[in-house]
Image: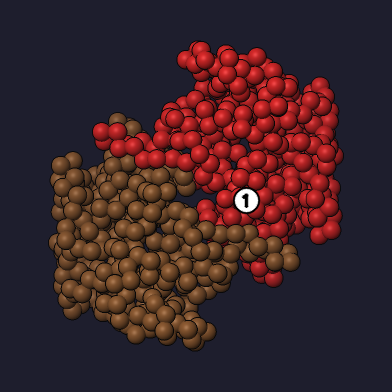
Chain colours: A red, B brown
Amino acid sequence: MKTIRTFFILLLISGFFINCKQAAPSEASAATEVKEDPLPSWNEGTTKTAILDFVNKVTTEDSPAFVPVKDRIATFDNDGNLWSEQPAYFQLFFAIDRVKGLAEEHPEWNNEQPYKAVLENDMNELMKLGVHGLLEIVMATHSGMSGEEFKEEVREWLATAKHPRFKRPYNELIYQPMLELLEYLRANEFKTFIVSGGGVDFMRVWTEDAYGIPPYQVVGSTIKTEFDYNKGQTEIRKIAGIDFIDDKEGKPMGINKFIGKRPIFASGNSDGDLQMLQYAASNDHPSFMLYLHHTDGEREWAYDRESHIGKLDKGLDEAADKGWTVIDMKNDWKVIYPFQLTKN
Amino acid sequence: MKTIRTFFILLLISGFFINCKQAAPSEASAATEVKEDPLPSWNEGTTKTAILDFVNKVTTEDSPAFVPVKDRIATFDNDGNLWSEQPAYFQLFFAIDRVKGLAEEHPEWNNEQPYKAVLENDMNELMKLGVHGLLEIVMATHSGMSGEEFKEEVREWLATAKHPRFKRPYNELIYQPMLELLEYLRANEFKTFIVSGGGVDFMRVWTEDAYGIPPYQVVGSTIKTEFDYNKGQTEIRKIAGIDFIDDKEGKPMGINKFIGKRPIFASGNSDGDLQMLQYAASNDHPSFMLYLHHTDGEREWAYDRESHIGKLDKGLDEAADKGWTVIDMKNDWKVIYPFQLTKN
């Protein structure tokens, strides 16, 4: 219980601080498409070569590194790995927007923290309220309704909310090179999973359209639920209370629980993914560990060891130590987002 | 917490009583295979027709009942629904055999309950020890080791243990007609899932070979785990403590958590499956609810309203009320187990 609480506190704290360093977006560089290239948005270089070599060796039947199809499990973190996570986890923007949307039904919120701080956009005050205030926001905006109602809220939010920097729906800020990687792995008979600290119900609404990853291949954090018979119109109701935090040690534990097999390919971008990569690294099969290093302050964001969000410190050291592959976003990626492709 | 404990107590109690009514196995009746028949081990009749009609209407694009591929979720209970569950849940035999196998390392067990009762095959004494005794057996035999070690134990047990009546490995006592149904649904682009009160790690060892259902499509009960870095050879260790009981209300909650979509096809055989069928019944899409009624005391077992294992009482009433489909094992199935097919 103590560990769970620690994770939760860490998650909320890290999700809370708003990272204000950002640069203006620039035009994406031209994505020159080579025929038959499965990763056209990736520049040639050691990163791309390492990925292609790994997939090639584990799918070549007479290779000593061959891995049977049923064991080709690939797990991907989501925030900062398949889509952006700056200036704060996108799910936090959703929670804040939900508070604002519900304010009319709750006139008392105008004088009650943490809601008052959210409604007044007073981030300093919100920070002072700490974990308890944030917990209250998450619970107030993610519980007390059926799973179906919650999904509908997420759908509406995605259809209307805009990212503060790019002025586009949040689910357009997904990484084009990672879409190609997912597709390439699936073409080689990998099963692709998301394993994220984000809320599973929040992600499942849009991950199938965005990444081609169906709801039952999304592992994430969960809050408690109850079964409501509701005169035969049965529902699952989301209730206040943390069920599972899918972060740090929670990631391999979540993989064990939901997937039941060790990944041979694990991809993340922060220290919260380190245990997942370690878990893949000790697979009996050959395995591939991939870190995304945010080095592109111009087209996306540059952050690592000191960041409050997506901190990558221990992971960077361990990757260097163990020879894991590290994507240098600025140099390895020709383009960041799909909407930038159409400009070329 | 109270609810979880209640489920657990019910599960253990129901798993405990050994149902001694059984009949000798007989030769399977001839399975006359009609060409192109997707369900050759099913006799013609209302049950088979109802299944074929449902699948036909939800997969016909110009039908008003058409369901898109991504929503074709089918969930199956396991014990007594895909394989037999008499004279007791097979996982209980595994736990008992584990106690016997570990006895040499634990000489103190010869004088300590509940182990003494297991070692002396004293079922009456074991029953007197009740829930606590059984809880201790489950924890002692399912925890304190890595997930990989546990799987190896299950594998060895399946390779050596024999069912008391049929004198065959337990995983040969799977239902041939249900194998055909699973395959038929998958051929029609359904995703097939197991949603069982059984332990998920116990099932995942063999469900892929037995049913073509991979580990990540198996939802079941779980015990607690911890992540062990183990000098870089990371492991998930199973520890004593209940995490989730996938029974009754737990089934729709488990479906919501692991699958994230309501089933359009739900199949079970006991009152423990009733909530799962209710959940499917209130899908916005057309849905199909299927109960297996154990009516064949000669070829398998006959039990329903009064059984300690796989009790089907409320479910039978609700199925009649709502017009759900009920398989009459004796009359609807030409053959029970795959090994009986080869005799014809």
**Which of the pair B181/B129 is nearer the observer?**
B129
On the image, the x and y values in percent for residue B132 come to: 38, 66
Residue A313 seen in the figure: yes
Q: Residue at x 65, y 40 (%)?
A: A9
On the image, the x and y values in percent for residue A55 come to: 69, 56
The C terminus of chain A, quarter of image: top right
Q: Residue at x 69, y 70 (%)?
A: A64
Q: Residue at x 29, y 53 (%)?
A: B272
Q: Residue at x 40, y 45 (%)?
A: B253
**Which of the pair B110/A59 is nearer the observer?**
B110
Write down the quadrant of residue A160 in the picture: top right
As drawn, is A317 to the left or to the right of B107?
Answer: right
Q: Residues within 10 Å of mark 1 (few under 14, many from 20)?
A: few
On the image, the x and y values in percent for residue A117 come to: 65, 19
* B59 is higher (above) or lower (below) than B62: below
Seen as rendered, the residue at the extreme front is B111
Question: Which residue corresponds to mark 1?
Answer: A3
